[in-house]
Amino acid sequence: MPPSPADPSPAADPRNTLWLALALSLGAAVSLGITRFAYGLLLPPMRDDLGWSYTLAGAMNTANAAGYLIGALTSPWLMRRYPPTTLLVGGSALATLFMALSGFFTEAGPLLLQRALAGVASALVFIAGGLLAAQLGARRPDRMGLLLGLYYGGTGLGIVVSALGVPWALELAAGQAHAWAWAWWGLAAVCAAATALLTWPARWIACSVAVRTSITPSVSPDADRLAVRVFRPRDFAFGLAGYAGFGVGYIGYMTFVIALLRDQGSSPGAITAFYALLGLAVMASSRLWAGLLDRHRDGQPLARLNALLGVATLLPALTSAWPLVLASGLLFGAVFLSVVASTTALVRHNLPPSQWAAGISAFTIVFAAGQIVGPTVVGLIADGPGGLARGLVYSALALWVGAALAWRQRGL
């Protein structure tokens, strides 16, 4: 279907819209798939080499989440001054820099600082990319769920690259002091390549669509109702609370599940397969849940997906049987980024485009706040009796509490 005369921008072409969403997904790959989740693969060798407790190992992702919160808090102010395309590419470049610097330190203090700074940069990338994906979806309201899923599914690409690249880098650097540093540098090189590729969708969108205000959405029967609505946190209280539960629960799994599998005796090849398949499931999730996100204007998608994540998180805490552990990874990967997409869809369904940035930022803030709590608490629990398995039970409970809260969120 060609662009209409009234809407001549290249982004109006549905084929270009899909390609732009896929290209934007590199931002999600950098900001979450690599900058945050690759650390789960590096935690065991760094902990062995540097003599960390699980509490300190978890604190590294707590620092990253604290930085993410700072980025989320400052993003509305920055978006009033800079176009989201600038924040997308600039934030990705900064995330690349901080990833590279993480390979030059062995003391906990500088590493905590690098993780925090990488979190700030990744928040700017993730929020700006999510806003651009939502604006692209306004051109195709019938495919909004798919377009958001494609963007957030880019995280899976970053996870797959990390799952394959980190063991390879560790093997090449075997025998050298602090071999894990080479993995950080390799991941930084991948981030640099993704940043270069991100300039293409950023340039297209900046040239063809007025992103500093909003992309004009298709007229809908709800247009008049939405036009006068402003974002108020109390209107989304249960959704925000449910999303905070997600932030607390999911990050414990993504931080420590590799360490748990290693403690349970899984081979390096099995761990690589587990994490790569988890990433592939993330990439496939855009198709799995697009209809759910499109149909519901309330908190049901967030509640249902949180509940499924709780099941996935609990499985490796109860058993080391490989089929069930693999099922846990596949289910977790197929669900967890769609939780993020569900909050963007909730904002898009209930607010006018001028309020999307405020709504997405608010959900990102509570998400980041939850992530600050999760890794350190799970680490503290893991250092006590019961170990990492008990820590993941705590994560599953947090997800189920989040599901119960989100279930009470109504459409406005």
Image (cartoon, rainbow, N blue to C red):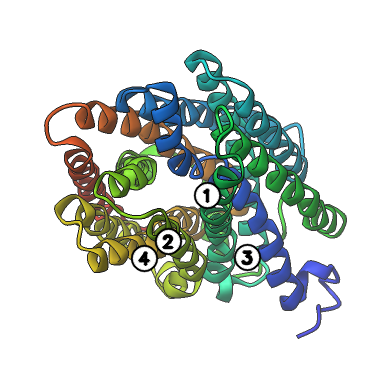
Quarter of the image where one finds residue 278: bottom left
Side (left or right) of 308 relative to 350? left
* Residue 211 showing in the rendered view: no
Q: Quadrant of residue 234?
A: top left
From the image, tell me which residue sits under label 3. Answer: 137
Q: CA distance from mark 3 to mark 1?
A: 37 Å
**Spatial separation of the CA atoms under disc 4 and disc 1:** 20 Å
Please state which of residues 280 and 337 is positioned toward the viewer in this rendering: 280
Q: Residue at the location (12% across, 30% down)? A: 385
- The three-letter amino acid code for the residue at tag 1 is Pro
Residue named by callout 2: 278
Residue type at mark 2 is Leu
Q: Earlier in the sequence, mark 4 or mark 3?
A: 3
Measured from the top left, where is residue 341 in percent x and y? 48, 57
Which element carries disc 2, helix, strand or loop? Answer: helix
Find residue 330 and name its label.
Answer: 4
Distance between mark 2 and mark 3 Cα atoms: 26 Å
Tell me, yes or no, whether the two marked residues, 1 and 2, touch with CB atoms within 8 Å: no
Mark 2 and mark 4 residues within 8 Å of each other at the beta carbon: yes
406 up-or-down from 145: above or below: above
Q: Position of residue 198 (x, y in %)?
A: 76, 52
Structural crowding at the residue carrying mark 2, measured as other residues with C-alpha within 10 Å and reported as few (<14), some (14–19) or many (≥20): many
Query: Which of the labelled discs sits on residue 167, or is there none?
Result: 1
Is residue 173 shown above or below 300? above
Q: Secondary structure at mark 1?
A: helix
